[in-house]
Image (cartoon, rainbow, N blue to C red):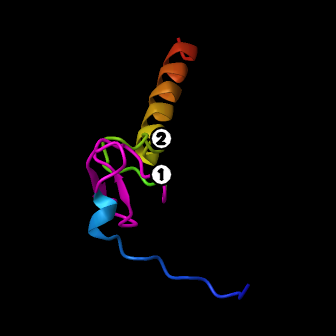
Amino acid sequence: MSGRVRPPREPSEDDWEDEDGGDTVPCPYCRRPIHEDSQRCPHCENYISEEDAPAGPKPLWLVIGVLACLAAAALWILGR
């Protein structure tokens, strides 16, 4: 076996329909065929749309704002 890596092949027209007769579409990232209703590509594991992707980390400004409000409330309560 040679140590060369094969480049990914371009999908053919036959790839766009699976054995169950369901339609497939190309993944927008890896271009391999996936089911039309997929939320995530089984090949490259990217989410197909931003709505399907899990929420990312909270923005730093939001975390700092919440901490500042909690600190202000604690100082107000302790200052009484």
The amino acid type of the residue labelled 2 equals Ile
Q: Residue at x 44, y 28 (%)?
A: 69
- In the rendered structure, which segment of residues is drawn in magenta? 17-44
- Nearer to us in this view, 35 or 51: 35
Reading the image, the residue beneath label 1 is 42
Q: Residues within 10 Å of mark 1 (few under 14, many from 20)?
A: some
Write down the quadrant of residue 25 in the picture.
bottom left
Q: Is residue 27 above or below residue 65?
A: below
- Give the Cα distance between marks 2 and 1: 37 Å
Q: Residue at x 50, y 25 (%)?
A: 70
Circle 1 SS class? loop
Q: Are marks 2 and 1 in contact (CB under 8 Å)?
A: no
Question: Dividing the image into 4 quarters, which one contains the N terminus?
Answer: bottom right
Residue 21 lies in the magenta stretch = yes
Mark earlier in primary sequence (2, 1): 1
Furthest residue toward right: 1
Q: Is residue 46 above or below residue 55?
A: below
| Res 64 label | 2
Circle 2 SS class? helix
Furthest residue toward top: 80
The amino acid type of the residue labelled 1 equals Pro
Q: Residue at x 48, y 44 (%)?
A: 57
- Nearer to us in this view, 8 or 1: 1
Residue 3 lies in the magenta stretch = no
| Res 12 label | none
Residue 9: x and y, percent?
43, 77
Residue 80: x and y, percent?
53, 11
